[in-house]
Image (spheres, grey):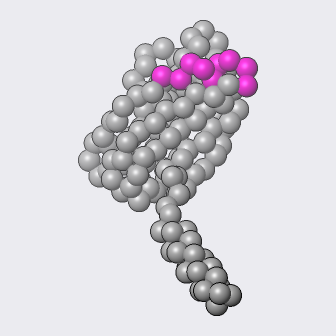
Amino acid sequence: MARTGKRASMVGMAAAAVVGALAVPAQASSWSSSLTNVGNDFESRRWTDDGGSTSIKFTNCTRSGSQAVNVTLRKDTFGPDPLYSTATFTNCFNSGATSTGNWDDHGSGDYYFVVDYGQNVYAPVSVSSLSVYY
C-alpha cells in the first residue's frame, strides 16, 4: 500500500513538472519608462518582439488643453513603417489612473509607438509611468 502511494505521488509530481514546463507566460517581455513634455509624432524606443500581442499602459498623464493622447503602434521596417490601430488614452488623466491599449500579434520584428501621430496641434504630454508588454 505504501509503495502504491509513493508511486502515485511520483507520477503526480512528474505530470506537474511537464505542465509547468509547457506553460507559456501571457507576456514574455516588458519595459517601463516615462515621458516628459513630448509632442506629436514622438517615437518611443524600439523593442524586438518574437510575436504575440502587445499592451501599452500609461499612468498619470498630464497636458494642457486636451485630456486625451493617441498612441499608435508601428513596426520598424526597411520601407514605410506600417501603422497599426491607434488607442486613445483618456483615463490616465484621472489621478492615479491607467489607460491601456492592446494590439494583436503582427509577427516578429522591431516595434515602437508614436504619440499623437499626424496631429497638427502641438500640445506636449507627460506620463509619469508607462509600460510596454510584448
Find residue 116 and report its horizontal and vertical position in percent.
Answer: 47, 25
Find residue 20 and report its horizontal and vertical position in percent.
Answer: 55, 68
Furthest toward the bottom, the residue is 3
Identity of the residue drawn at 60% across and 42% down: 131
Find residue 30 and report its horizontal and vertical position in percent.
Answer: 57, 52
Identity of the residue drawn at 43% across and 16% down: 120
Nearest to the observer: residue 30 or residue 80? 30
Whether residue 112 appears in magenta in the rendering, the answer is no
79, above or below 118, in the image = below
The mark total stands at 0
Whether residue 89 appears in magenta in the rendering, the answer is yes
Q: Say left or right for 134 vs 127.
A: left
Find residue 33 and report its horizontal and vertical position in percent.
Answer: 65, 43
Furthest toward the right, the residue is 95
Residue 98 seen in render? yes
The magenta segment: 88-96
Quarter holding the N terminus is bottom right
Nearest to the observer: residue 52 or residue 60? 52
Identity of the residue drawn at 51% across and 52% down: 26
Quarter of the image holding residue 93? Answer: top right
Quarter of the image holding residue 80? Answer: top left
112, above or below 3, in the image = above
